Image (cartoon, rainbow, N blue to C red):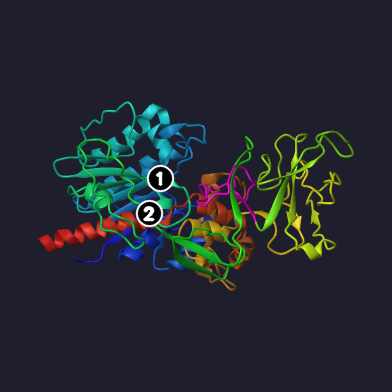
Amino acid sequence: MSKLTLGSLFDGSGGFPLAGLLCGINPVWASEIEPFPIRVTTKRIPQMKHLGDISLLRGDKIPPVDVITFGSPCTDLSIAGKRAGLDGEQSSLFYQAIRIITEMRCQTNGKYPKYAVWENVCGAFSSNKGQDFRSVLEEFCKIKEESIAIAKPDKWEHAGEIVGENFSLAWRVLDAQYWGVPQRRKRIFLVADFNGQSASKILFESESLSGNITKSGETRKRITTSVEDSFGAASELCLNDQGGSRMDVTNGKTATLRAQSNHPPLVFENHGRDARVKGPIEVAQTVLSVYGTGGNNQPFILEKSKTFDVRFTSEGTTNVRANVYESSISRTIDTSGNVPDSNQGGIAVVAVQNEGDKKNKTPIFSASKNSHFTHAKEEVANTLVATDYKDPPLINEPNRIVRRLTPTECARLQGFPDEWCSNLGTDEPTEDEILFWTEVWETHRKVIGKSKRPKTRKQIIKWLNQPHSDTAEYKMWGNGVALPCVHFVLKGIVQTLHRSSNAG
């Protein structure tokens, strides 16, 4: 069997191409407009060609591939957004991917692509009262049968399939926490087999992968029918960060976000908008693209510290609420020290001390840009105050802080290697490189529309010298895919074709 080829639309972090390489699939080209992810994948997968803006691509003009993958923008489908649906400015790009697939199949007389893989948020099931997911299924089916119509049920199930005379389509919700990484990340994975009936075999009957993931072989009915309990058994293997220097794979051990190998921190789910806090937790909440841009719902980590719930009204005011209470976590703090109701509370974080070291208290400082402080009683520490919403806390003792997830930890939660975003700079770019990146940035400027002027040559060279920023990396991971889930799906395609060739 010849080596399969892959094309990645909305490529992002390069999860589909990397998973393809791990499965023995050759990534040929990718389409992406964000400069930072392109810089990452040009460094990590230099053999893959970048084609730019999807709206300018023609499926009959680009190299044909066996598999086309895409996680079209989910902004308008997510329950966290305005729910504009597939007609929204971002999510409507789904139709561009369908166009490219159709054009390629017409050009190659139906030979390429053999498969398509679509990944998206579960909000697609309910967006536009379920009509958007019906449209997704219908558009995939119309690539083969133009006259097909899909009926919408009262509620879309999390797994199902459609089988035609000479094509098949199946979908399934995969949660990353059951595929080897400690992150709750439920995503729809849809596989279309344009020349056969193997879609359900790929998603439900694939052989187990490394990580003790049992195969799903549940009985299903045809045509958009639920597959009961299709998630499979949870893996017992976890990634464990040992002091930031290496990542160990352990069996039955969870505490994956560690500052030092000898004391795991406490990780808390945080919902800054409505002050909900959940934790300590063993499985992180979903990595979001807004991490690093102001906190929002980013989880926070308490490393070997005690937390005190502090109630106060304003500086210098003494009342019955100006007391310090030890608690597992303050109810209102978010990752950047923001207390939503500025007159209702804050927290004091106190490093654990030995009995004989009480005289050497560890001071804790607010990173506030103003001089407003409320002092905790009992000589505990200075507290984080409500006005500290712009800056995270500062603690002058190593490994005893309240902090947010680092970009590297987000990479690990997505199943990627630590070095994926390392050493991205180019000290002396060639003329061809400068020209390429000038075009990349100009495409980004025209599509995003936030800048009125193109970047100068000097700006391009400066960016190439140091292209990395935490904000750009957070955004990439939040918009990316969980590598183990993608690997599972692409491995299923390889295994299915291998079984088919052996049977023939």
Write down the residue under mark 1. Answer: 187
**Quarter of the picture holding the C terminus:** bottom left
Q: Is residue 256 visible?
A: yes
Task: Residue 319: say if magenta.
Answer: no
Q: Is residue 439 visible?
A: no
Answer yes or no: do the residues labelled 1 and 2 have beta carbons within 8 Å?
yes
Location of residue 85 in the rendering, given as x and y in whole percent from the top left corner? 43, 33
Residue in the foreground of this view, choosing between 114 and 399: 399
Relative placement, left or right, of 377 versus 98 is: right
Residue in the foreground of this view, choosing between 374 and 116: 374
Location of residue 390 in the rendering, given as x and y in whole percent from the top left corner? 73, 46
Residues rendered magenta in the picture: 278-302
Location of residue 481 in the rendering, given as x and y in whole percent from the top left corner? 43, 52
Image point (24%, 43%), residue name? 169
Q: Judge whether 239 appears above or below 366 on screen.
A: below
Q: Amino acid at mark 2?
A: Cys
Relative placement, left or right, of 75 versus 457 is: left
Near mark 2 (Cα within 10 A), the count class, few <14, some 14-19 or many ≥20, is many
Using the rendered view, name the quadrant where residue 74 is placed.
top left
Q: Amino acid at mark 1?
A: Arg
- Magenta stretch secondary structure, dominant: loop
**Quarter of the picture holding the N terminus:** bottom left
Q: Earlier in the sequence, mark 1 or mark 2?
A: 1
Write down the residue under mark 2. Answer: 485
Relative placement, left or right, of 340 versus 240 is: right
* Count of numbered circles in the view: 2
Location of residue 117 in the rendering, given as x and y in whole percent from the top left corner? 32, 49
Near mark 1 (Cα within 10 A), the count class, few <14, some 14-19 or many ≥20, is many
Tell me how far mark 1 sits from mark 2, CA to CA: 9 Å
Q: Residue furthest bottom?
A: 428
Helix, strand or loop for disc 2: helix
